[in-house]
Image: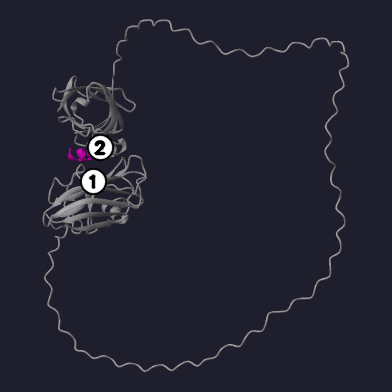
């Protein structure tokens, strides 16, 4: 059961990244009244072959909107087989939605479900028309199923026909039409009598000037004038002798002055912030995961690496007992920033790496919902701000979950953590 919950949590983190902002990032605070009415749902999973679960879920929130109850009517269909009911008729389970729009419900001994609301519609109330979910069936071999659900919205009755409006005012006169085609030319009339002779015309303009005559010959060049007069002689004078150097003055050194008063005390220094980090190689990852020759995808569920560059695989639960060199003792302080870089990005659409800052002396300080970042296909780095406190000699490490139908390719990883020393 614990392994199922870890897989559901890791898939939920990938869904949250793909869906974008939750209702809280749009200044909405979600609650259990955001699910109301009947939703058609469909989910797909794998257990001895692929299977599909289809049917309806009817949500009825409590009056205080803190939680509510849901009734299921579902059918299970294996690939190539007939559908059969999956749950007893009229099975009722409690559900809860937090302020960030992340919901959960559990049918004891049967299934645990996590879901994220989206597509909110504002009206008299806020109701989600659609949500995605991840379900873990609580069997001896956990089964994970993912899917989506959409609300059935009945059409409202048609309104009455409105009253016919009054006749509008007469429109303005239209634009004048184009001019018609010109008629045929009439028959030419008889020639009229000769008119009176006109007055003499104005005198014509003067004629064009005649051509210039031939240029006469150039006159004889006169004799050149006299050149500049001769340069006068340069004056000569002797340089006077250098005067003698004066004697150096002599005087006794004065006494040392008194010591000045102490200056004011400077301000107290700020917090001491240090940067710690670590690496792990792809070869170390494959060797520790037990992958056979030629297989590049990781085969373990999760692992730790830390400032000592060590590497420790775990089964299906946090925390493990890291070996020497993975988790290292820290001074009293707080981890505030996580930065991770990998060499090979995840190659499949459903693959991802999930990194979490851990305090191995506190079982509650290795939770992906508290301080973690995710690397999805196409990316090779991620960073996230958060806060994880450490007492003196508490051990720091980074927990990693490889997510996907098959594990992402093994890759070298490097991380850095900003750590502020002090209470």
Residue 358 place in picture, x, y as percent? 18, 50
What residue does disc 1 label?
A: 372
Would you say 399 lies left or right of 245 here?
left
User: Split into 4 quadrants, where in the image is the C terminus?
Assistant: bottom left
In this orientation, does residue 53 appear?
no
Residue 32 place in picture, x, y as percent? 18, 27
The residue lying toward the viewer, choosing from 387 and 215, is: 215
Report the mark closest to the observer, 1 or 2.
1
Which image quarter: residue 121? Answer: top left
The residue lying toward the viewer, choosing from 168 and 34, is: 168
For residue 153, above or below residue 347: above
What residue does disc 2 label?
A: 12
Distance between mark 1 and mark 2 Cα atoms: 13 Å
Which image quarter: residue 127? Answer: top left
Q: Is residue 2 magenta?
A: yes
User: Split into 4 quadrants, where in the image is the N terminus?
Assistant: top left
Q: Residue at x 32, y 54 (%)?
A: 412
Label 1 neighbour load within 10 Å: few <14, some 14-19, many 20+? many
Q: Residue at x 18, y 48 (%)?
A: 387
Q: Earlier in the sequence, mark 1 or mark 2?
A: 2
Label 2 neighbour load within 10 Å: few <14, some 14-19, many 20+? many
In this orientation, does residue 21 appear?
yes
Q: The magenta stretch spans which residues? A: 1-12
Q: Residue at x 84, y 36 (%)?
A: 204
């Amino acid at each position: 059961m614990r392994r199922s919950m870890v897989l559901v949590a890791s898939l939920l983190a990938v869904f949250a990244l793909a869906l974008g902002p939750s209702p809280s990032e749009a200044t909405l605070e979600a609650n259990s009244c955001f699910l109301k009415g009947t939703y058609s749902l469909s989910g797909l999973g794998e257990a001895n072959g692929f299977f599909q679960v289809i049917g309806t879920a009817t949500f009825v929130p409590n009056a205080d909107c803190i939680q509510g109850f849901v009734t299921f009517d579902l059918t299970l269909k294996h690939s190539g087989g007939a559908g059969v009911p999956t749950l007893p008729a009229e099975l009722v389970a409690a559900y809860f939605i937090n302020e960030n729009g992340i919901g959960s419900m559990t049918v004891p001994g049967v299934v645990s479900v996590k879901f994220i609301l989206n597509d909110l519609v504002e009206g008299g109330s806020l109701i989600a028309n659609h949500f995605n979910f991840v379900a873990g069936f609580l069997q001896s071999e956990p089964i994970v199923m993912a899917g989506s659900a959409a609300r059935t919205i009945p059409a409202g009755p048609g309104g009455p026909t409105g009253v016919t409006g009054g006749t509008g005012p007469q429109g303005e006169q239209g634009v004048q039409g184009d001019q018609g085609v010109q008629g045929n030319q009439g028959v030419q009339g008889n020639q009229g009598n000769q008119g009176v002779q006109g007055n003499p015309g104005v005198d014509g303009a003067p004629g064009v000037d005649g051509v210039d005559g031939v240029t006469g010959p150039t006159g004889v060049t006169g004799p050149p004038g006299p050149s500049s007069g001769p340069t006068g002689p340069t004056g000569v004078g002797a340089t006077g002798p250098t005067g003698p150097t004066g004697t150096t003055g002599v005087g006794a050194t004065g006494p040392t002055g008194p010591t000045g008063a102490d200056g004011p005390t400077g301000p107290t220094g700020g917090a001491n912030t240090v940067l710690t980090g670590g690496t792990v190689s792809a070869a170390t990852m494959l060797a520790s995961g037990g992958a056979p020759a030629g297989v590049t995808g990781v085969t373990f569920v999760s692992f730790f690496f830390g400032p000592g560059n060590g590497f420790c695989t775990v089964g299906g639960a946090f925390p493990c007992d890291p070996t020497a060199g993975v988790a290292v003792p820290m001074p009293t302080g707080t981890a505030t920033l996580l930065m991770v870089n990998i060499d090979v990005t995840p190659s499949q659409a459903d693959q991802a790496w999930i990194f979490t800052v851990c305090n191995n002396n506190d079982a509650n300080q290795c939770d992906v919902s508290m301080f973690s970042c995710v690397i999805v296909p196409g990316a090779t780095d991620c960073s996230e701000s958060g806060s994880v406190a450490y007492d003196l000699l508490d051990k720091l490490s980074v927990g990693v979950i490889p997510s996907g139908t098959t594990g992402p390719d093994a890759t070298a990883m490097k991380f850095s953590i900003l750590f502020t020393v002090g209470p």
